[in-house]
Image: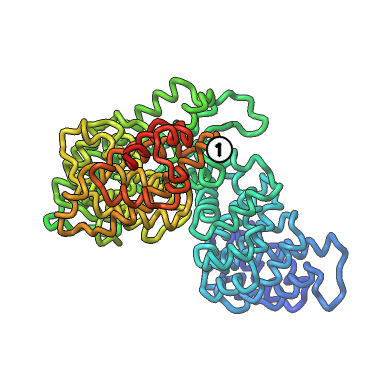
Amino acid sequence: MATGDDGLEECLKLLRGERDEQRLAGLLLATKFCRGDDKDSILKVFHALGMRFLDRLLRTGTGQSTGTIPNKDQQEAYLQLALTIFAAFCRVPDLASLDDIISKVPIILETLTDKPGQRITVECFECLLGIATASEKGFFALRETRAIHIIAKHIYLLPADSPSIEMAVKLMQFLLAKIPMEIEITEYADDLASAVVAISRQFAIQQTSLKFDALLLISTLVASEYSDPIRNALQSSSRDPVWPTYVRIGIGTILQNRVVASKKHLALFLARSMMEMFGEDWLIGPMNLPGDENTVPLDRCFLLVLETSRVEIAVLLNELAHFKFDSSNGVCSNLEDTTIRQRDLANIYTLMENIIKLLSNACDKQDKCISESSMVKAMTALNESIGFIFDFLLDAKAHDLMKGDDLLASIRIIARYLAESPSAYQKQFQELLPYIFSVTGESEQRPFLSVQFSLPVLCQTTMDRKGCDALVSCGGHKQVLEYFSRLVEDISQEAVGTILLTCDIIMNILLKRDEMRVKVRVVDFLPVLPVLAAWAAKGNDSMAIAMSSTISTLVLDLSSEDLLSQIPEFQTECLSKASALIIQCLELCQQTEKSEAPADEQDLYDLTVAGCARLMARYPSIRRAIRTSRWFQHFLQNQSSMEAIMGVTCNPCMQDLLMSIIG
């Protein structure tokens, strides 16, 4: 009986034969010895056979031979045999990096294109993966032949249960990791979007390592900084509409099982990207594969993401605190580890912001997709996470650390949460406010973003007297005013909402000045007067004019013209600009009254008119400017009686103002 070695020797003897029939018989035998990673046997077969005969067999199998073309069945058999042996050669890096092997990349890609549904696809992908990973030259051969485009298209066409999927996913991931993403994604966005749809099903159904390969590839394609073209293609196409559900199922499966932290973070990163693509509501939805009749709550993925985020926030903050605070000189001992954790933390914070928005919208709409018990769990988890973040900031304060993007991101998520739940951690936030306003990002020279992130919660807390006291007592109102000034310098359409939010905070303080225990000093607010006038001039709309004039009258109401003139830094031209602004607002107020249609700015008009009336006795220059204005003369038509005033306006506040001007 022949041994394995005897069989291999017989095979090699046939491969060295002079006739094609001998070599063909040798190749059939060689398939038994070239299985797996038996490198020695594969090398012996390669050296016995060489590449000339294999090349001819490949060309015959693909119909490119110049000689007699066999019938279709024989042609396919030749191709299968040639690719089986060639794939074995490509499993040996020393062989896969040879020029003779690399030169076959075009014909293999052509085979994939021409014969997409055949059994040979496994061998084709094995050949391409071996060549790509064996050498830079092999990698460039695939890049130059538009392999990404062909592979992506092929993945979409493969049956869901095809054994080729795993190899194709590994190959595409390897190529994308080495190719400039912005080039490939832009050029092949539509094909790559099709690949995402196909791979997402594998992500949902697989329970092998392919699930993690699919997670990595989908994340690469839809969650990178260059992914916009693919996202657009996915959102505008008529491809399988179930694929977002597949991604949700895959993420849920990973998060509910014991996997390493890096895989969980990648799953959370993908969840964040899906919410950015489809809105926060994507997190709530079916968790069943088509045909699966098991009942799974719609909020299952939501709870898994939230609970995982809660745990990971606690872990990451603890590790960052160890890296940053336990070092003797305040310098991170392991910069790379710290950077990775900061990146993961920033991603989870963004995810948490989306969840906060989701919960807020669900409460507003009384959405039943999130059960009452799940809502309680969610609020408990969020509250606990915010507590961890407060502890982290308190540690940073105790160690005199005031610079860092992680600190800035922590402030942002706290403020976002407290804006929805102002009573939660209110005392801690107010006590930490001086520190919060001292924090800067890595690229900032002075605090700006920390103020910006705090605006939503400050708008809520300053509606109460205690909130105003807390802000003014630490000098935070000055930083809000400075932030407003810097924002107006370079105003954009996107900044309008932030400007109005800042104005609300300033106005809240000024309106509550008589209730506050902390004195509000006019000198703190004087620098904002010319800024308000500039904003109104730039904005040139009724809201900007109404808001600016309201705040201006409230600031001026803190003092008098005589007292302001004694302040060295006060410029008298501020009163001229304020006067012009107030007159504009009064004119708009009158026009609104004539139209008999309520204006969005009506409350601001009323505040301006009432405030202006209080100023008349203390600001003769403003009184004179209004009285001599064209608007005033046209309004009263040179009449000065009470009857005339009542004839032109029914607004009691406007009547009082006009009387104080002519009186």
* x and y, in percent, of residue 126 in the image: 61, 61
Q: Residues within 10 Å of mark 1 (few under 14, many from 20)?
A: few
Numbered disc total: 1
Query: Compared with residue 586, is residue 490 higher up or lower down, i.e. above or below?
Result: below
Residue 407 visible in image: no
Which residue is the site of mark 1? 595
* x and y, in percent, of residue 527 in the image: 25, 55
The answer to which of 206 and 626 lies nearer the viewer is: 626
The answer to which of 362 and 297 lies nearer the viewer is: 362
Residue in the picture at 69% in, 57% down: 154
Instruction: Report the amino acid beneath label 1.
Output: Ser
The answer to which of 462 and 185 lies nearer the viewer is: 462
Q: Is residue 72 left or right of residue 121?
A: right
Residue in the picture at 66% in, 50% down: 236
The answer to which of 635 and 57 lies nearer the viewer is: 635
* x and y, in percent, of residue 613 in the image: 32, 39
Q: Secondary structure at mark 1?
A: helix
Query: Compared with residue 571, is residue 507 higher up or lower down, i.e. above or below?
Result: above
* x and y, in percent, of residue 263 in the image: 43, 46
Q: Is residue 496 left or right of residue 550?
A: right
